[in-house]
Image: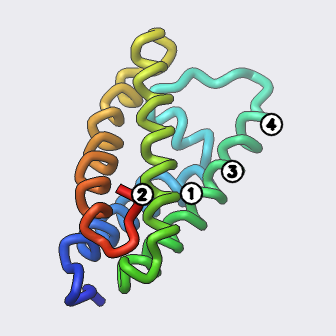
């Protein structure tokens, strides 16, 4: 359902929720090592901690995605969810920029900089249109 009062914000949230849920959250939760290899990471021989961290991040990402699905139906009623989504996307943008500048990540992760910027920049603009927004 698209919120008729804020259709732009609603569409944005649906698109972000679906893309993040399918592209990152579920793969990290269910198959973190396969996801990591697909993104060009070299994995250590002892991988239990890597699996644990991947699943932890995947679990948080699934919950954030599900909350974003809910917020998409009535964005003005779920400002907190949008704020958390934008905060997480900003943090991930910073982490990916740092990784690119330090040369510590595969090129696939560098490409994600555009994706996170594509969430943060329009997301902040859309968020500012909602009543009660802090911007």
In this rendered view, identify the residue nearer to me: 18 or 125.
Answer: 125
Dot 3: element? helix
In this rendered view, identify the residue nearer to me: 9 or 22.
Answer: 9
According to the image, label 1 marks what residue? 61
User: Between marks 3 and 2, how big is the CA–CA gap?
Assistant: 15 Å
- Name the mark nearer the viewer: 3 or 2: 2
Please give left or right for residue 88 compared with residue 125 in the image. right
Label 4 close to label 2 by CB (< 8 Å): no
According to the image, label 4 marks what residue? 48
Please give left or right for residue 20 compared with residue 31 in the image. left
Rate crowding at label 1 as few (under 14), some (14 to 19) or many (20 or more) other CA atoms within 10 Å: many
Label 3 close to label 4 by CB (< 8 Å): no
According to the image, label 2 marks what residue? 20
According to the image, label 3 marks what residue? 55
**Image quarter (top left, top right, bottom left or bottom right) of the N terminus:** bottom left
Earlier along the polypeptide chain: callout 3 or callout 1? 3
Dot 1: element? helix
Rate crowding at label 3 as few (under 14), some (14 to 19) or many (20 or more) other CA atoms within 10 Å: many
Earlier along the polypeptide chain: callout 1 or callout 4? 4
Q: Measuring from the top left, give residue 102's x and y in whole percent.
A: 47, 9
User: Between marks 4 and 2, how big is the CA–CA gap?
Assistant: 24 Å
Locate residue 48: give its quadrant. Answer: top right
Earlier along the polypeptide chain: callout 3 or callout 2? 2
User: Between marks 1 and 4, how big is the CA–CA gap?
Assistant: 20 Å
Label 1 close to label 2 by CB (< 8 Å): yes
User: Between marks 3 and 4, how big is the CA–CA gap?
Assistant: 11 Å
Rate crowding at label 4 as few (under 14), some (14 to 19) or many (20 or more) other CA atoms within 10 Å: few
Q: Indicate whether 88 appears above or below 6.
A: above
């Amino acid at each position: 359902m698209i919120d008729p009062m804020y259709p732009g914000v609603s569409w944005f949230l649906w698109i972000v929720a679906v893309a993040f849920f399918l592209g990152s959250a579920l793969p990290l939760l269910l198959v973190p090592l396969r996801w990591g290899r697909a993104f060009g990471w070299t994995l250590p021989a002892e991988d239990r901690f890597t699996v644990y961290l991947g699943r932890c991040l995947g679990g948080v990402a699934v919950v954030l995605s599900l909350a974003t699905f809910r917020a998409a139906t009535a964005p003005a009623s779920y400002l907190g969810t949008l704020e958390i989504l934008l905060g997480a996307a900003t943090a991930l943008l910073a982490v990916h920029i740092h990784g690119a500048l330090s040369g510590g990540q595969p090129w696939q992760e560098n490409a994600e900089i555009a994706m996170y910027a594509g969430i943060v920049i329009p997301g902040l603009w859309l968020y500012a249109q909602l009543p009660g927004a802090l911007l």
